[in-house]
Image (spheres, rainbow, N blue to C red):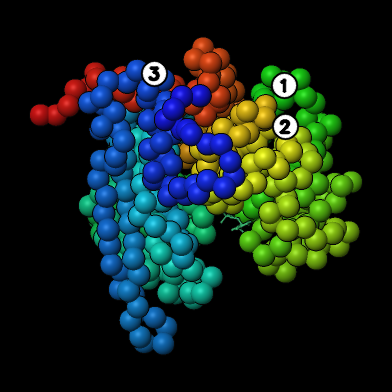
């Protein structure tokens, strides 16, 4: 480990949890390791452009509320920008800058022809009516319309946005452009140009890299125990797919509660229970466990699948998993990364572990442009090929440079993006 991520000696050190500075620190470290020239380093450290918006919305009671929104494009050297839209009360501009940068690396790692972007609105969608959410989404789409488009920047779902939100985005963009443009967003409902397999893609991608990691570590997935933080799209589907592969899901948490059963939770029942009650809390046959304790459980595979900065200097020493698979974006801080690495715990970084989502988003975009749709087996087979190759590429790069998997992933991605930039040249 080089000095760019150090020093770190004690858990008393106050960590910088600003996502953008974390993303830059990870980038700087890898850029130094692969000897990236200073000029390109300066370009790639920051977003290409960003839009900051005030979004007035007429609420159901007739009042007007103004929401803050953003769209950030980090880099488009390898193709149109691509990245999700997050609706969350704690969304910040810096967080979206980090997420946009991570998207650039992610697309490069799975070698799909996209750059990176991310957007978001500071709001709590659970406290908005469906009509308010629709008006907010349409206003946001209208404001970012000059930046987005099937060959410019293609949004997708992220935390607390879904296929319905994508349908409103597609409709608003199409209405203002005078023709139907399904390729402007991915993660759409199937009957509006969505792809089979997109809903499960992030979790299925995780499954493929977990299988590959098990092979490298000599672990049998059907004997492995798994703890998962977050029970939304990524977390709940990962739980289902892993349990179908024979793994034992011993703990799961959501934003309200956590549940534990050392003999294994029955995932389909837990999914149905959460759909009915709104939370995993008090799931029959389980005992309660705190969200923090889920991360520190004795298990083979730990999957953070919620939000950023969950494994930090405060708890990294207590993580007992053999491998951490980052379904979420940015769940491990750089200092915690170092602690895990020193303790021999493999971290499969977000830019690889959750890249299945953007990969099938790419498939969706390709199908929309071709107006020719694939069956689900075809989607899953292509996804598996890409994820298995990406894992092997990252693993080989990490070995070659004698670094952990995250830095290996960054080196691979930086090399691909920098190569595109060098070859295209800096305009004018
Ligand atoms: P989601 O909205 O479907 O689910 C989020 C889940 O996290 C919910 O179960 C929620 O209860 C839980 N949660 C929120 N705060 C929590 C907390 N403090 N502790 C424990 N649980 C908490 O979102 P998602 O799409 O599953 O995204 C989860 C993560 O995966 C995010 O970091 C996202 O960026 C990343 N990701 C998602 C996709 C995708 O295709 N959905 C793709 C790549 C990355």
Residue 404's x, y, as percent?
Answer: 55, 24
Residue 217, label in figure: 1
Q: CA distance from mark 3 to mark 2?
A: 28 Å
Of circles 1 and 3, which is in front? 3
Q: Is residue 391 above or below residue 15?
A: above
For the residue pair 306 and 28, the one nearer the viewer reads as 28
Of circles 1 and 2, which is in front? 2
For the residue pair 7 and 184, the one nearer the viewer reads as 7
Q: Which residue is mark 3?
A: 34
The quarter of the image holding the C terminus is: top left
Q: Is residue 69 left or right of residue 19?
A: left
**Contact, mark 1 vs mark 2 (Cβ under 8 Å):** yes
Q: Is residue 138 left or right of residue 178?
A: right
For the residue pair 404 and 374, the one nearer the viewer reads as 404
Which of the 4 image quarters holds residue 122? bottom left
Q: Is residue 121 above or below residue 299?
A: below
Secondary structure at badge 2 equals loop
Q: Look at 32% across and 48% down and name the residue there.
A: 72
Secondary structure at badge 1 equals helix
Residue 198 in view of the camera: no
Q: Is residue 397 left or right of residue 301?
A: left
Q: How many marks?
A: 3
Q: Look at 52% across and 29% down and name the residue there.
A: 406
Q: Look at 52% across and 36% down and name the residue there.
A: 8
Q: Which residue is mark 2?
A: 322
Which of the 4 image quarters holds residue 424? top left
């Amino acid at each position: 480990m080089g000095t760019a991520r150090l020093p770190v000696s004690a858990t008393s050190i106050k960590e910088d949890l600003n996502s953008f500075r974390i993303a830059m620190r990870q980038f700087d470290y890898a850029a130094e390791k692969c000897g990236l020239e200073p000029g390109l380093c300066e370009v790639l450290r920051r977003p290409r452009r960003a839009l900051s918006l005030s979004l007035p919305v007429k609420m159901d009671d007739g009042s007007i509320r103004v929401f803050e929104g953003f769209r950030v494009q980090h880099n488009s050297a390898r193709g149109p920008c691509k990245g999700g839209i997050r609706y969350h009360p704690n969304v910040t501009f810096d967080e979206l800058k980090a997420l946009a940068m991570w998207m650039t690396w992610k697309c490069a790692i799975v070698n799909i022809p996209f750059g990176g972007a991310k957007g978001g609105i500071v709001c709590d969608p659970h406290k908005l009516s469906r009509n308010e959410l629709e008006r907010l989404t349409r206003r946001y789409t209208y404001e970012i319309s000059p930046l987005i488009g099937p060959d410019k920047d293609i949004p997708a779902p992220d935390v607390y946005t879904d296929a319905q939100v994508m349908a409103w985005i597609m409709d608003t963009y199409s209405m203002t452009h005078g023709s139907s443009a399904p390729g402007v967003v991915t993660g759409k409902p199937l009957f509006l140009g969505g792809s089979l397999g997109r809903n499960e893609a992030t979790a299925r991608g995780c499954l493929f890299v977990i299988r590959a990691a098990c092979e490298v570590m000599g672990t049998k997935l059907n004997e492995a125990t798994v703890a998962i933080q977050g029970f939304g799209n990524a977390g709940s589907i990962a739980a289902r797919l892993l349990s179908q592969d024979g793994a034992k899901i011993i703990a799961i948490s959501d934003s309200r509660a956590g549940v534990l059963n050392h003999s294994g939770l029955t995932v389909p029942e837990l999914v149905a229970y959460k759909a009915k009650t709104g939370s995993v809390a008090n799931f029959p046959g389980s005992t309660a466990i705190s969200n923090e304790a889920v991360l520190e459980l004795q298990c083979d595979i730990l999957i953070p699948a919620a939000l950023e900065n969950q494994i930090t200097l405060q708890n990294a020493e207590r993580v007992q998993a053999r491998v951490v698979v980052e379904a979420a974006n940015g769940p491990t801080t750089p200092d915690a990364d170092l602690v895990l690495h020193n303790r021999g715990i493999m971290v499969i970084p977000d830019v690889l572990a959750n890249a299945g989502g953007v990969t099938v988003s790419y498939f969706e975009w390709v199908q929309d442009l071709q107006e020719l749709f694939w069956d689900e087996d075809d989607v899953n087979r292509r996804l598996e090929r890409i994820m298995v190759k990406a894992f092997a590429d990252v693993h080989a790069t990490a070995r070659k440079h004698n670094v952990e998997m995250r830095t290996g992933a960054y080196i691979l991605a930086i090399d691909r993006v920098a190569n595109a930039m060098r070859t295209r040249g800096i305009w004018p």
